[in-house]
Amino acid sequence: MAVPAGAATQPARATTTSTVTAGATALALPRVKVPSALPTVAPAMTYRVQAGDTVSHIALRTGASVSAIVQANGLDSRAFIRVGQMLRIPVPGSAAPVAAPAPSGTAARTHTVAAGETVSGLAARYRSSVSAITSANGLNSRALIRIGQRLTIPAGGSAGAPSAPAPAAPAPSAPQAGGSHTVASGETVSGLAARYGTSVSAIVSANRLNSRALIFVGQRLTIPGAGSGTGAAPAPTSPSAGPLVPDSFLGRTYPQQVVAAANANKATLNAMSVPSRAEMQSIVAATARDMGVDPALALAIAQAESGFDARAVSPANALGTMQVIPSSGEWASNLVGRRLNLLNPRDNVVAGVAILRQLVRTAPNQYPAIAGYYQGLAGVLRDGMYADTRTYVAKIKTNMAQYR
């Protein structure tokens, strides 16, 4: 599984096969250096893009929002930037077009995790983002958190956002049935479904989206079902076998919204014509060669993650051959400069290989790069490899031998 910035808070990972220990959908991202205090600047500042930068990382470091940077620089929905480009960075709280100004007086707040809370729920509640919270706390691609854990919540909302958790953490201003939402940069249908307590399939149906559920910045979506009943549509089931994707794996039960999204994605994949396992193996090898990644390494990762199953979906909503979660897919889209559809088998491979390539470029050597795909590179560099991470790395090295 590819992991966005950070280390795993819990080593257990959901997969779709008994031989695969990896399966989260988030990708391992390199550690982002965040200044302890933001400099005092004028209403707008300029920034020169460095190698490896993405708009989301720049937003996190400067305290601006992704949508504000996109708007200020006339970027398209991909938020694509290039090395050496000079960006105008709106200052949070100024008159510059910032979509979600940071609260005055502090760059971040802390939150103690209560039962039933998820990173996506906290991101919606505090008007931050999943990627910002995972990066700030060194979480792995699954963004797993535990009761009692103290999290740093990067600034990104209004001063009126709550500073302490309520017993339940509903998404702020969730629409009633038939409500609407204007799509901001980086948002996905699965993320909106989790935020508003509805399902991917309900949003897709209400807005007549295609099977890829692609949306674009500024698009107005109808959000059905929010605020009615349990807050999430039940996972789709097959006629006789129950849910397509279970809600638990290795003793961990996943939030209903995540499982509902996983089931909706699984149903979509089941209805699609996808390449065979042998064909996927060839696609992985060819993509790795094209992108400058060792094909044996990419093949070994794909074998461990899904067994080359293009329809693989885990309870954590890790998707496809490379088991990429939607938030990691957004990061991969930034890495390659175009929007990737994780339900498209070829795009899924591109996403996984792009993340793997970034890990290889960033890690001291191949061993932490492999571990980073499983645990998160920042966590590996900070805490070392967990026992199950070492097992994963050994498995990948064994798999690589058969592809030499």
Image: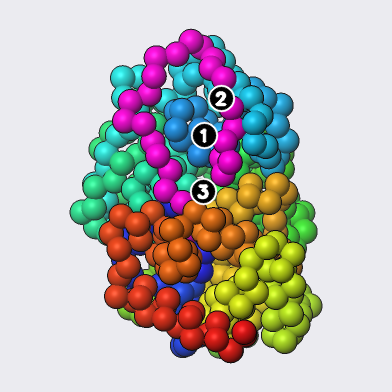
**Which residue in the protein does label 2 denote?**
47
Few, some or many C-alpha atoms within 10 Å of disc 1 (few <14, some 14-19, many ≥20)? Answer: many
Instruction: Name the residue type under label 1.
Output: Ile
Specify which label sits upstream in the sequence, 3 or 1. Answer: 1
At horizontal 66% and vertical 29% (from top left) the residue drawn is 85
Q: Quadrant of residue 300?
A: bottom right
Local secondary structure at mark 1: helix
Q: What stretch is highlighted in magenta?
A: 26-54
Few, some or many C-alpha atoms within 10 Å of disc 2 (few <14, some 14-19, many ≥20)? Answer: few
**Which residue in the protein does label 1 denote?**
58
Does residue 394 show up? yes
Q: In this view, does 15 lie above or below 38?
A: below
- Could you tell me if the residues under marks 2 and 1 are in contact, i.e. CB atoms within 8 Å? yes
Instruction: Name the residue type under label 2.
Output: Tyr
Q: In this view, does 119 lie above or below 8?
A: above
- Could you tell me if the residues under marks 2 and 3 are in contact, i.e. CB atoms within 8 Å? no
